[in-house]
């Protein structure tokens, strides 16, 4: 089945935060855009990052200008996404046998302090051994001191969606679950794409096609006979059911790599690994050895980690630019724009990191505008993203208005900022759809109605459905009803959606069951009876 | 070239750091400074007792058996204490208005006794109360 072709100035392929940022940038310049994502917004590399907007502390060893640029752009993101970002304070404990003593580490932090004001962050603090242990009692007694350094945390799924939403509000069209199958050519020139959505093939013509597909960039570029040299690297994270600390704990793994334990909202993320990847980008598994590697590293400074409960593991592929010889974690995280003179009309942006997404989007939009003859300048560093336009209501006010608990209201504000009231709509019943996440039923319904959540996994990304300790065992059936009511699902479709979600969640949980997960799993199985799992 | 320049500048920064340390009288309270900077964001340390409580709190499977024994404690559904409230600590002050009313010891004890995985509900509630006002 095929539908009538559409025509626009630009088609952007890839709905990670970079592709969404490109669509937003172009839409703000008045360019007509179609954004296509084969899965869901932020579901690929963006969502499987460590959820950090950092300023590039590690670049101080290589190039201070890169640190300055990183901090400056992190500052822009903090300015435009106030409601989505939160301070993350690193506690860097120093052990007697560390390669760098506390004086060297503090020196680097002192230098970094010069750049911190660019991203509205506080300077470092030096702590004695007693102070470190008092601040974080879970740390080993071997600690001889510590220093702090501040970065920003962000939910990349919400960040990607906020960019999509702003693009749409400025005239773009954005379709998730729309897979590009081929490019349309006129001779060598690329003049559009063909994509499939809901079983229908559609042709979309454009003067520029942007390939912002991260690690999939070589596959898309190959559709135009172009080569993109990447060295993809796999990274896994282990996610814990709650904040294990209010501070980021940093340590070294057995091979000297930095490992972080990062609190984000109601969860904690332990990561990451960094290994060359040669397999299928759409079928990446978490291995038990990778989990062991992370736990061994963190247990060295934070023995309490062995007694805490991980609830899932995530994995993703970094689109690292190709370089022969260096170990994976020594590879540059820089990005590159490819203009493909042999396939005019196609632009590829790849490499880079979450912190630089806005700048990557700006450079890509500049290149597209040059081809289109558009002179409008980039405004993404100054215009707030949806939800950050003004102050949000207080949780108590919102709770009163909607008959909710203040916790559910505060969670809605964390995701929607000043638009939380609109996200909760007219509902006054105060029902909770997911008790662990304390997610209001009205907010879940809004995700399906207004935020393009087309499956329960999409709702997990958009509003945290089933992201908590019970992993959906207690809420998935009711959630399927709420989402299904909005999307017109039949009873059997609701049942199938719940089954599909639980099976998908199992893949992330199974490598962790040996680590205090069996009690939870038994409950999940009980909740899943009749799904045939 | 930029790498060499970066390393030279870091070397200079290290020399200045050492010099400053020798001239400085004595360190102030790093912990005090940290609380001053991050208190407004509610990024406060957990106590040792609270840290010890977390593994037991993490055992909650949100089965709801405690809620069958005690519908509400301190205004909250007891199953929500460990599964929902004791998760995102900096957000708790914004949720302070949820904690109303009493949590009689006898009620807490029977709710805790109903828990199949031994979540220490009294300790969990105490931790939530402290972090709500932190």
Image (spheres, coloured by chain):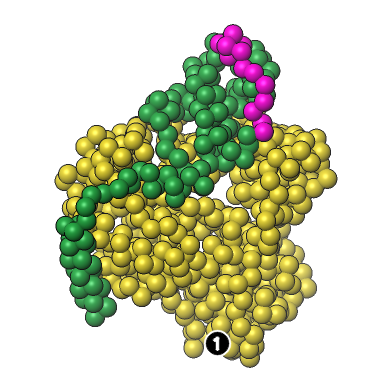
Residue B107 magenta-drawn?
A: yes
Counting from the top left corner in percent of width and height, residue A286 is at 41, 45
Q: Residue at x 62, y 49 (%)?
A: A414
* Residue furthest to the front: B25
| Chain B tint in image | green
Query: In the rendered view, would you say A412 is above or below B16?
Result: above
Where is the N terminus of chain A found, in terms of image quarters?
bottom right
Counting from the top left corner in percent of width and height, residue A483 is at 73, 43
| Chain A tint in image | yellow
Q: Is residue A103 left or right of residue A489?
A: left
SS class of the residue under badge 1?
loop
Q: Residue at x 73, y 43 (%)?
A: A398
Q: Is residue A207 left or right of residue A326?
A: right
For mark 1, name the chain. A
Residue B86 magenta-drawn?
A: no
Counting from the top left corner in percent of width and height, residue A417 is at 66, 53
Residue interval drawn in magenta = B97-110
Counting from the top left corner in percent of width and height, residue A357 is at 51, 68
Where is the C terminus of chain A found, in terms of image quarters?
top right
Q: Nearer the viewer, residue A203 or A168?
A: A168
Q: Residue at x 25, y 56 (%)?
A: A105
Q: Is residue A475 something that shows in the picture?
A: no
Mark 1 burial class by Cα count in 10 Å: few <14, some 14-19, many 20+: many
Query: In the rendered view, would you say A96 is above or below A34?
Result: above
Q: Nearer the viewer, residue B41 or A218?
A: B41
Q: Residue at x 68, y 18 (%)?
A: B71
Q: Nearer the viewer, residue A430 or A206?
A: A430
Q: Which residue is mark 1?
A: A344
Q: Nearer the viewer, residue A497 or A59?
A: A59
Query: In the rendered view, would you say A270 is above or below B71?
Result: below
């Amino acid at each position: 089945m095929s539908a009538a072709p559409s025509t626009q100035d630009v088609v952007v392929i890839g709905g990670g935060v970079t592709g969404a940022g490109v669509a937003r940038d172009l839409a703000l310049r008045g360019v007509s855009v179609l954004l296509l994502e084969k899965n869901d917004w932020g579901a690929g590399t963006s969502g499987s990052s460590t959820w950090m907007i950092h300023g590039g502390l590690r670049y101080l060893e290589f190039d201070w200008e890169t640190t300055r640029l990183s901090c400056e752009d992190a500052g822009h993101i903090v300015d435009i996404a106030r409601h989505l970002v939160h301070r993350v304070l690193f506690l860097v404990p120093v052990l007697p046998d560390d390669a760098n003593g506390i004086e060297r580490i503090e020196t680097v932090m002192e230098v970094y302090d010069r750049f911190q004001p660019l991203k509205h962050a506080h300077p470092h603090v030096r702590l004695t051994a007693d102070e470190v242990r008092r601040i974080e009692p879970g740390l080993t007694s071997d600690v001889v001191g510590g220093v702090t350094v501040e970065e920003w945390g962000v939910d990349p799924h919400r960040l990607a969606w906020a960019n999509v939403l702003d693009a749409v509000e400025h005239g773009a069209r954005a379709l998730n679950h729309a897979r590009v199958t081929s490019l349309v050519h006129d001779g060598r020139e690329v003049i559009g794409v063909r994509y499939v959505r809901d079983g229908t093939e559609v042709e979309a013509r454009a003067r520029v096609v942007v390939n912002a597909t991260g690690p999939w960039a070589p596959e898309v570029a190959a559709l135009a006979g172009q080569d993109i040299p990447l060295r993809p690297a796999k990274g896994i994270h282990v996610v814990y059911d709650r904040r294990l600390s209010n501070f980021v704990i940093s340590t070294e793994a057995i091979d000297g790599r930095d490992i972080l334990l990062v609190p984000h909202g109601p969860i904690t993320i332990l990561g990451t690994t960094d290994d060359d990847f040669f397999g299928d980008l759409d079928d990446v598994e978490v291995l038990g050895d990778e989990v062991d590697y992370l736990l061994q590293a963190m247990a060295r400074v934070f023995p309490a980690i062995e007694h805490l409960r991980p609830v899932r593991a995530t994995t993703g592929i970094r689109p690292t630019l190709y370089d022969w010889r260096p170990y994976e974690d020594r590879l540059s995280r820089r990005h590159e724009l490819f203009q493909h003179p042999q396939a005019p009309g196609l632009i590829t942006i790849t490499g880079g990191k979450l912190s630089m997404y806005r700048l990557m989007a700006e450079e890509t939009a500049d290149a597209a505008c040059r081809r289109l003859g558009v002179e409008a300048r980039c405004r993404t560093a100054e215009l707030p993203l949806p939800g950050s336009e003004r102050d949000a209501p207080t949780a108590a006010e919102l709770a009163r208005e909607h008959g909710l608990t203040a916790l559910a209201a505060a969670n809605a504000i964390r995701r929607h900022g000043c638009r939380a009231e609109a996200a909760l709509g007219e509902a006054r019943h105060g029902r909770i759809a997911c008790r662990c996440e304390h997610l209001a039923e009205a907010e879940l319904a809004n995700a399906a109605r207004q935020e393009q959540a087309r499956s329960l996994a999409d709702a997990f990304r958009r509003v945290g459905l089933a992201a908590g300790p019970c992993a959906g065992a207690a809420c998935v059936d009711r959630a399927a009803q709420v989402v299904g009511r909005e999307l017109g699902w039949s009873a059997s479709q609701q049942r199938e959606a719940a089954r599909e979600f639980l099976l998908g969640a199992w893949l992330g949980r199974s490598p962790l069951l040996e680590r205090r997960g069996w009690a939870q799993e038994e409950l999940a199985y009980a909740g899943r009876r009749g799904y045939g799992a | 070239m930029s790498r060499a320049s970066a390393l030279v500048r870091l070397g200079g920064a290290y020399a200045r750091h050492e010099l400053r340390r020798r001239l400085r009288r004595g360190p102030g309270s790093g912990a005090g400074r940290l609380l001053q900077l991050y208190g407004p964001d509610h990024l406060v340390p957990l106590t040792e007792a609270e840290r010890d409580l977390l593994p037991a709190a993490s055992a909650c499977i949100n089965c709801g058996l405690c809620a069958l024994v005690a519908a509400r404690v301190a205004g909250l559904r007891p199953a929500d204490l460990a599964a929902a409230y004791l998760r995102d600590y900096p957000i708790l002050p914004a949720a302070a208005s949820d904690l109303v009313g009493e949590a009689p010891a006898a009620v807490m004890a029977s709710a805790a006794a109903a828990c199949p995985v031994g979540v220490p509900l009294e300790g969990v509630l105490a931790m939530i109360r402290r972090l709500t006002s932190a």
